[in-house]
Image (cartoon, rainbow, N blue to C red):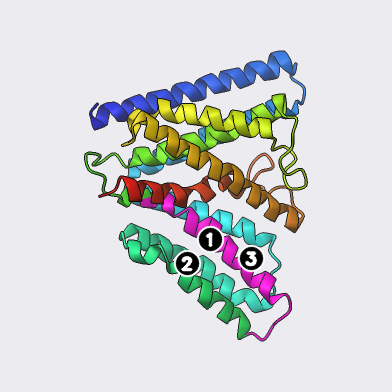
């Protein structure tokens, strides 16, 4: 198919799925829940509305072009970083480090992605920011909980800026025979991860019996893990036409991403439990930006390097 045909097919398919999901969610709320609160149905409808918002935001960014995609994910990183650090054990001595993180490190990371300087944006945060930011806190002579404070800031930058920035970085890859279609790599990633989340959630609620880490995330079960992973892999195979992957390759990539998303999301849940919060923030309907994109965050760099190593020229 041509680039234009692929674009229209993808857009039409996503729109049809969203409409179908919305109708199903409304029917379940009316017929099964009888209009009353229902934890599973209400959670499903919240996720569907989040899909709508995410689809519209990404669609508008794509209309603007590459710069629009960079601005969108820089905004996502800024909001998620703010949510992460809101519950962090920071002190006055961390003020300069926090200012640097928000207004120097974050925009410079996206600038590096924008100019396609892979050698620098792949190490800027995990090497230079990792070493320099604790120094800013140390010169303030406040050693109380220093390791916990600096470690939290470093993890916040890694998750919300470094990891998320690998999503627009997918546009930088040069894949033979795939010119001008890199945006479909982003769409594929988001669809696989978000649908995997929903399948995990639904399978756990209906079939879940064996909790994987009850003290960290009691809603994650072995049955949900198997059902969600299998469903996401099947979806990846069905969507292979929009990628440079064969059907088998799409299945393997989807499996790797889903596994990383599930267990990476578990690690982020442990961080929330450590801070004594249920959600990272409150933007809409009790959830924050980081709650919405947490799984995509931890998968993005893994997915980027899989594609870069095996398919990029």
Q: Give the distance between the C-alpha atoms of the residues marked 3 and 1, in whole angstroms.
A: 10 Å
- Magenta stretch containing residue 178, yes or no? no
Q: Toward which corner of the image does residue 293 lie, by quadrant? A: top right
Q: Position of residue 102 (x, y in %)?
A: 53, 66
Q: Toward which corner of the image does residue 113 lie, by quadrant? A: bottom left
Q: Earlier in the sequence, mark 3 or mark 2?
A: 2
Mark 3 lies on residue: 152
Q: Main secondary structure of the magenta part?
A: helix
Residue 214 appears in the figure: yes
Where does the N terminus fall, quadrant-wise?
top left
Q: Give the distance between the C-alpha atoms of the residues marked 3 and 2, in whole angstroms.
A: 14 Å
Task: Give left or right: position of 283 versus 7.
Answer: right
In the depicted structure, whether residue 91 falls above or below residue 53: below
Mark 2 lies on residue: 125
Residue 199 appears in the figure: no
Q: Earlier in the sequence, mark 1 or mark 2?
A: 2
Q: Toward which corner of the image does residue 32 lie, by quadrant? A: top right
Q: Secondary structure at mark 2?
A: helix
Mark 1 lies on residue: 158
Q: Position of residue 205 (x, y in %)?
A: 71, 28
**Residue, x 22% and y 39% (percent of image)?**
177
């Amino acid at each position: 198919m041509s680039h234009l045909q692929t674009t229209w097919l993808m857009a039409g398919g996503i729109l049809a799925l969203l409409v179908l999901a919305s109708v199903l969610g409304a029917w379940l709320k009316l017929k099964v829940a009888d209009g009353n609160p229902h934890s599973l149905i209400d959670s499903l409808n919240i996720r569907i509305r989040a899909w709508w918002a995410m689809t519209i935001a990404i669609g508008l960014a794509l209309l603007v072009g590459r710069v629009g995609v960079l601005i969108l994910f820089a905004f996502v990183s800024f909001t998620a970083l703010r949510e992460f650090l809101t519950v962090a054990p920071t002190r006055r001595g961390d003020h300069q480090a926090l200012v640097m993180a928000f207004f120097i490190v974050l925009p410079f990371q996206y600038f590096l992605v924008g100019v396609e300087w892979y050698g620098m944006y792949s190490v800027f945060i995990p090497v230079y920011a990792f070493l320099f930011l604790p120094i800013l806190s140390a010169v303030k002579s406040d050693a109380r909980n220093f390791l916990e404070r600096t470690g939290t800031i470093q993890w916040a930058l890694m998750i919300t800026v470094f990891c998320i920035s690998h999503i627009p970085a997918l546009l930088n890859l040069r894949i033979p025979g795939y010119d001008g279609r890199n945006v479909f790599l982003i769409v594929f990633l988001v669809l696989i991860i978000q649908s995997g989340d929903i399948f995990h959630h639904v399978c756990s609620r209906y079939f879940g019996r064996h909790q994987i880490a009850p003290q960290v995330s009691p809603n994650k079960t072995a049955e949900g893990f198997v059902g969600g992973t299998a469903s996401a892999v099947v979806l990846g195979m069905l969507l292979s036409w929009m990628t440079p992957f064969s059907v088998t390759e799409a299945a393997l990539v989807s499996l790797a991403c889903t596994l990383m998303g599930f267990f990476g999301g578990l690690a982020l849940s442990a961080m929330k439990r450590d801070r004594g919060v249920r959600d990272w923030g409150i933007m809409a309907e009790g959830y924050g930006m980081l709650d919405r994109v947490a799984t995509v965050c931890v998968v993005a760099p893994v997915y980027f390097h899989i594609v870069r190593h095996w398919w990029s020229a």
